[in-house]
Image (tube, rainbow, N blue to C red):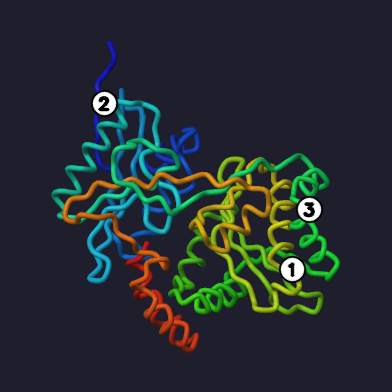
Amino acid sequence: MVSAVKVRSFAEVDSARWNEFVFACPGATFFHRIEWRGIMHEVFRHRTHYLLAERDQRIVAVLPLAEVKSRLFGHALTSLPFAVYGGIAGDDAEGVAALEAAADELARKAGVQHLEYRNLTARHTDWPRQDVYFTFRKEILADDDANMAAIPRKQRAMVRKGIKNGLIASIDTTPDRFFALYSDNVLRHGTPALPKRFFQTLLEVFGKDCEILTVTTADGKLLSSVLSFYFRDEILPYYAGDDLAARDLAANDFKYWELMRHACARGCRIFDYGRSKAGTGPFSFKKNWGFEPMPLSYEYRLFKRDEIPQNNPLNPKYRAFIAMWRRLPISVANRLGPVLVRNLG
């Protein structure tokens, strides 16, 4: 006789079991790791609701959720803010259904406007869904020559240009150089920067599974930097920044080539270029590397709104804000940014 599934809230004593399940579950991602619960609470001050489904005291599915309240952007329950992937991880159909039912009940009790699942693949094709995001994933081959040959010709020429320019890639132990490039980069694009302490927390909490690679000229000028996550045999470059001089020196191309080489040496077999919006420069850049876009299935339960929220820079109503933000001194933007960005997720 098959035992019934039971759903309950996460407790601190579940931490090791939760991560053991996440690392073993094919549908789980880096963002399902339990460490994000503390980061959501401590860095962003969001209330978390982590749920797990058990059968015979064995975890069969997990759902990380965070509650975001904002006067500007509304009240939402999301799996998971600041993550490109989320939703329920688990292959037990009854466990998945039980978690969905529990999340619906939780959302209604909390009075949120919507519940959002950031799924890698579709679960409910009849639910309202966001269609603007794509992810890019590709196999890392066994050696550098094979990986270089797999890059399309024009992009390969850019990588070789960076190599010929004598650029240097190194691993940083602090977020200082990365944050200088990242914060300047997002300001130029008219969006608030995440707080520097967030990146410091990522390095401290995830240890060897979070790493910063920075590219400089031979004489030490900062050009480009990327913060990446490692999960099982995958690498996910996640946050990045470039100096204005990076383009002419092909530093961005060189950066991702060096990252791929580094990941290969670490035993990674999947390069996950992460999320981009269709029709943007990063979307085209990733396609030029030979990565095929895969649509992400962001699915919604709408409770107190009629349409899916569009809290992204492509929304025309944010154009005036973006134009204004670009004009701020970077010291002011970095002071105000964390206050605003915590509610964007």
Q: Residues within 10 Å of mark 3 (few under 14, many from 20)?
A: some
Label 2, label 1: how many angstroms apart (C-alpha)? 54 Å
Q: Left or right: where does residue 345 sit relative to residue 94?
A: right
Cα distance between the residues tagged 3 and 1? 15 Å
Residue occupied by mark 3 = 153
Q: Quadrant of the N terminus?
A: top left
Badge number at residue 266: none
> x, y (%) of residue 155?
74, 57
Is residue 205 toward the left or the right of residue 45 in the image? right
The answer to whether mark 2 and mark 1 are in CB contact below 8 A is: no
* Left or right of residue 146: residue 32: left
The residue wearing badge 2 is 5
- Alpha carbon separation for disc pair 2 and 3: 53 Å
Give the residue pinned by disc 1: 250
Disc 1 crowd, CA 10 A, few/some/many (<14, 14-19, 20+)? many
Picture quadrant where residue 81 is located: bottom left
Q: Nearer the viewer, residue 204 or 152?
A: 152
Mark earlier in primary sequence (2, 3)? 2
Residue 59, position as x, y percentages in the image:
36, 31
Above-or-below relation of 162 to 8: below
Picture mark count: 3
Lower position in the chain sequence, tag 3 or tag 1:
3
Q: Residue at x 29, y 47 (%)?
A: 300
Which amino acid lies under the numbered mark 1 shown in the image of this protein? Answer: Ala
- Residue 88 placed where, x, y %? 36, 39
Image quadrant in which the C terminus is located: bottom left
Q: Residue at x 37, y 51 (%)?
A: 130
- Residue 111, image x, y percentages: 15, 55
Q: Amino acid at mark 2?
A: Val
Which is closer to the viewer, label 2 or label 3?
Answer: 3
